[in-house]
Amino acid sequence: MAILTALLLQKNWKRNLTVKVALENNVDDIQLLNDLVRFPVSSKIEAYKLNMETKLLKKSSTDLNIMKFPKNKGISELINNIKTSSLFCIDSSSEHALV
């Protein structure tokens, strides 16, 4: 749901999309994600280590961060730590997108 929302906003606002993906080891997963989603050519896709969301978001200067709903950490704690515009999505694993 977060990816679908990001793609629709990118298309409607005519802006650049930066995707940051948490990965353990396999960098090939970024290419697989790009192949499955078919991000626009101007998209920037980066990887970061797992459990680094808060540190990454504190440095963020993006207009809007769209991410999954945090399961292991309270949402109010995360919002208080990052102090940036964020949209949290809960994925039902049944949505599909064509943009």
Image (cartoon, grey):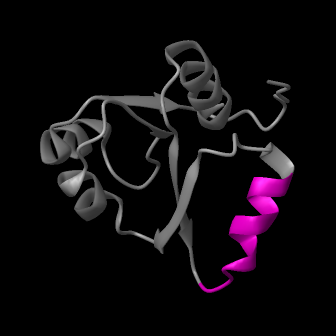
- 64 inside magenta stretch: no
Image position, residue 53 (x, y; %): 35, 59
Q: Is residue 95 left or right of residue 40?
A: right
Q: In this view, does 36 lie above or below 22?
A: above
- Residue sitting farthest toward the bottom: 25
**x, y (%) of residue 72?**
41, 55
Q: Which residue is drawn at 27% across and 29% down?
A: 85
Measured along the vertical axis of the image, is residue 58 above or below residue 38?
A: below
The residue that appears at 15% across and 38% down in the rendered structure is 83
> Picture quarter containing residue 93?
top right
User: Which residue is painted at 48% across and 28% down in the image?
Assistant: 15
Q: Is residue 26 above or below residue 39?
A: below
> Horizontal and vertical percent for residue 79?
22, 38
Instruction: Determine which quarter of the picture holds residue 23.
Output: bottom right
- The boundaries of the magenta stretch are 25-35
Nearest to the observer: residue 95 or residue 29: 29
On the rendered image, what quadrant is the N terminus found in? Answer: top right
> Which residue: 81% across, 28% down?
95
